[in-house]
Each structure stands twice: as structure tokens, then as C-alpha cells.
Image: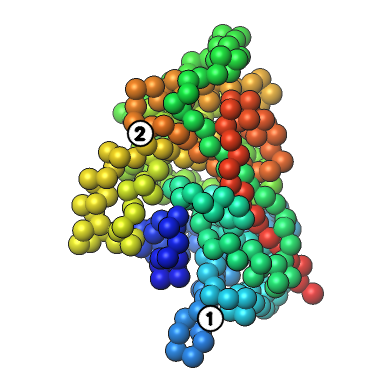
Amino acid sequence: MYERNAGDPHWVPPLRLGEHDRINRNKNPFFAHAEIELLLAWNGDRVVGRIAAIDDDLHQKTHGDNVAMFGFFEADDAEAAGALLTAVEDWARARGRAHVRGPISPSQNDMCGLLIDGFDTDSMLLMPHNPPEYAGFIEQAGYQKVKDLFAWLYDLERGVPPLLAKVAERRRQTLQLTVRQIDMAEFAREIDRLRELYTSAWDGNWGFVPPTKEEFAAMAKEMKMIFEPRCAVVAEAKGRLVACAVALPDINQALRGTNGKLFPLGLFKLLTRRRRIDQARLLLLGIDPEYRVTGLYHVLIAQLHQQSVGSQYKRVEFSWILEDNRNINQPAEDAGARRYKTYRIFQKALA
């Protein structure tokens, strides 16, 4: 992956240790309920592609759609891509699966989708960036779009739109909300409450599988290392957590030039460049189903904007959002965000 994408000026090398842990059965709690097969394509003595075949028991129990996944996809050309995808299909067919879907690496609670537009900007934290030709490679292998995911870019420097601020304040007063930052002194308790909210808020969304307690704890542990309190908002009603918007500083801005390595100089670069990070990615946005139609998205966006005043942050990416999730896409557009990237998930029926 690192050699394949090194020439792309907008590809940011992820930390190699983190990438290794994502596919390590002993490090990633996702594999307590899923199987993975790691595959390479060779041309002579040269590796020309890679892919992972993934079968998640928890996904089958949740959705019953008999789908296996492919992820961690890289290929030099259409021939290598076709060979890799055929190998995944054979593996999935042997396990009795009727469809293959991807790229999902390794689940929708992690990194998923293939970038199909917006190649002229850097990828943000935990969002994929791939060569433009990959979509063609996958389509040539018989895959079709099953779902698009959107990324919105929101400018924090232009001030909170007056209408947004007015609507947000009205909702806050009507619902008697307490809107605040995450309490770092109670981080473990806050994470438990966030997981409960995340699970209920996303229940019923396309492809969503609730993360186990162990998976969410692992994600929270990674988040805490780079967490910035002013980048997160929670809303309470009658003492109950009913909404959240959690963004993380875009650490990708500090990873440039490290080649994904912390040593010998990568850690130094990471630490010295962190103060230059001026954007964040909103990766956790959820509202309790009981409050979903009350306009709380406007409250969260407005509060997040207000908390950024005087900070180093100039923009925030809302990602990713299902193409048909009007409950989030519409408030994002109303707030003045710009949809600037699309990621695609493909699927193929197995004969």
C-alpha cells in the first residue's frame, strides 16, 4: 500500500502499527465474531495487489443478508484486481455466502467505501483515499453500486449562520436541553453512555452492526490519545444523554512525511506538527430515536461551531453519511456545509 500510493500527493500514509493491529486477530476485538483471510496477488516475484476476505457472524445475525465482505483492497491493474476479487468470491462461496460487498475494512464501524470523487484533497483521519482507477477495476469484475457515502466540509471561520443559531436556540429551550462538552474526568462513564446512544441512534441504518463493548472500548482508547474536548458535544434531556457529535483532530495533517513510521523521526514529526492541525473530522453523530425529529442536529452543529471559536480549527468534515440519510444530509446543507467527496460500496451476487 505504501509503495503503491507514495506518488499520490493527497494520500496520507496511515500509521503502520495501527494498520497491522486492524488485521490482527489478537489485537482487534472485531475478530471475536468475524473471520478474515488475507490474500496477495503476485506477478512473478512482485506483489501486485492485496485484499482481505471477511465474514462477520454478527453482521449475519443482525441483517440476515448472507453477505461476505472484501476490504484492504489495493491493485496495480484490472487483472490483479480481478484475480483478487475472484479469490474472495471463491472463499465466500465456500462459506455459503450469496453476495460479496466492499470495500469494508474490516467493518462499517471502521474504514469503508471507495473514493469516487474529490481526489484533489487529502483524506482525513480514518477515511480512505485511493487511485481513481480502482472503481473501474471493481466494476470490470462484475460489481455494482449498492450504496454511496457522503462527506461534507463545514467552514468554521465564517461564523454560525443566523438562521441555524436561531433554530438551535429555540430547540434547546423547547426541549430543556443541557448541551456540554464531554467530561474527561468521567471519560469511562461517558464512553459507556456514548456507546448506548450510538447503538440506539444507528439502529436500523443500512449495514449497521452495533459494536461490541470491547470494540467500542478499543475505539475509545485510540480516540482518547488525540481527543480535544472542544471538538465534542453531548446533549442531555432530563438527565439522559440524547444526542452527541464527536469530532477528532485530523491527525493526518501531522502524518505527512512519516511514511507511516513512528521511528526514528516519525514520532518527533507527529508531536511537533500537532499544533498545526487546523481541521477535524466529525465521525460520531447520533440522536436518540425519541428525539430524532426534533431538530437536534441543528443544535449539535451550532454548539460545535461555537466551541471552535478562538481555537486553531478552521473546518470540520462530517463523514461519512449514507446518501439517503436525509436526517443528517439536510441539516448539513442547511448549515452551509459543502458536499465535497463521495465514497462507494459495491456488491456482487454470487452464482
Q: Residues within 10 Å of mark 2 (few under 14, many from 20)?
A: some
Amino acid found under the numbered disc labelled 2: Glu
Nearest the eye: 224 or 305: 305
Instruction: Tell me: residue 55, above or below residue 246.
Output: below
Instruction: Tell me: residue 4, above or below residue 278.
Output: below
Q: Which residue is mark 1?
A: 41
Give the x, y percent position of residue 338: 58, 35
Could you tell whether 254 is left or right of 37 in the image? left
Give the x, y percent position of residue 13: 39, 59
Which label sits on residue 11? Answer: none
Could you tell whether 316 is left or right of 140 in the image? left
Secondary-structure class at tag 2: loop
Amino acid found under the numbered disc labelled 1: Ala
Q: Which residue is mark 2?
A: 228
Q: Among all residues in the image, which is located at the extreme right?
A: 351
Give the x, y percent position of residue 61: 67, 55
Give the x, y percent position of residue 63: 70, 53
Distance, label 2 to label 1, CA atoms, is: 41 Å
Identify the residue at horizontal 70%, vertical 73% (top origin): 141
Is any part of residue 114 visible from this angle? yes
Is any part of residue 67 visible from this angle? no
